[in-house]
Image (spheres, rainbow, N blue to C red):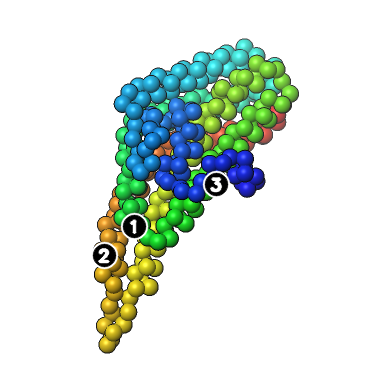
Amino acid sequence: MFRVISKIIPIYRQLNVTWYSAFKPIYYLTSLLGLFPYTLKHESTNVFKTYLNSYYLNFIYASIIFIILCVFCVLHIQDVIYAGKSYSMTNENLTEINYIFEFVFLLVYCFVAYYCAFTNGKLYINILNRVIATCRRTAVDRYEKNMKLVDKRLKKIVYSYTLLAVTTIIINFTRKGSVWKSVLVLFTFILPQTVQLATLAHYCSLVVMITGLLDNIILCLSYYDQNKRVAHGIWTTKPRAVSILSNLKTCFIKVYNIKEDINRAFQAPILFTAIQCFHCLVSEAGSLYHGVG
């Protein structure tokens, strides 16, 4: 499937892969949902630069999306309450409460995701630039192979989450029921879940970048191992290999610090995702027990 998509999308076959081109699909996905607080400059390939006033424009855009989610959440609650026993998905009072609480909790998650995104906006850019700076310190002859591998992994993440979101939307509008109920489900369940998936995709993309840096460190170690010799029982290496080895400790510490910053930036959305998924499992189990469906 990914080979077919790669033939359709020409960006997948770029010869000169940069960190900007690798991160661009994730950036477009998160920006579409208002989860990336800055607008990146397209001419910047070796460093991530932003436009000066892009933060405020993206904040307004994200606020509009969240207000729309709040409006449809209220409309959905009114629809459930007024429908009462005739509502096909909530035939029991307890199930009805769990059903309402489920999409309300998704709305709370969206608030947490947007709040963390705009609070940690500068941290996002700082992480990306530190990844590039650390990568330059660990660049070796086979570095481009690792970059292409990172590029493929990031694009597969975007393709997977996008395909899942599109499939969910198609299923929602092809099922039995009125169009209005499908629209309510779209804006109270599917769109918040898409925001949730986009946040997780952003987190996974940064982790993949970290693994790319670790792969570069492994390449540096293999280069050092290939250039050491034994002369009269003494290990000797080329000066360049010694210089590379002296940078590995510093690079590894930087990679560890970047991973700590990633965890700090995404710990609240991931925590709320775990809680929401747990409640969803319990709620769906209760619905099956009461015979709702």
As shown in the figure, which amino acid type bears the numbered disc 2? Ser
Residue depicted at x 53% and y 41%: 11
Residue depicted at x 40% and y 61%: 141
In whole angstroms, how far apart are the C-alphas of marks 2 and 1?
11 Å
Q: Position of residue 86 (x, y in %)?
A: 70, 16
Indicate the secondary structure of the residue bearing disc 3. Answer: helix
In whole angstroms, how far apart are the C-alphas of marks 1 and 3?
24 Å
* Residue linked to disc 3: 13
As shown in the figure, which amino acid type bears the numbered disc 1? Thr
Residue depicted at x 48% and y 33%: 28
Q: Earlier in the sequence, mark 2 or mark 1?
A: 1
As shown in the figure, which amino acid type bears the numbered disc 3? Arg
Q: Quadrant of residue 230?
A: bottom left
Residue depicted at x 59% and y 33%: 165
Residue count near mark 3 (Cα–Cα under 10 Å), binned few <14, some 14–19, many ≥20: few
Asked whether 107 or 147 is in front, the reply is: 147
Q: Position of residue 189 (x, y in %)?
A: 57, 27
Up/down of 236 relative to 7, above or below: below
Q: Residue furthest top?
A: 82
Indicate the secondary structure of the residue bearing disc 2. Answer: helix
In whole angstroms, how far apart are the C-alphas of marks 3 and 2?
34 Å
Asked whether 236 or 171 is in front, the reply is: 236
Q: Are marks 3 and 2 in contact (CB under 8 Å)?
A: no
Q: Residue furthest bottom?
A: 232
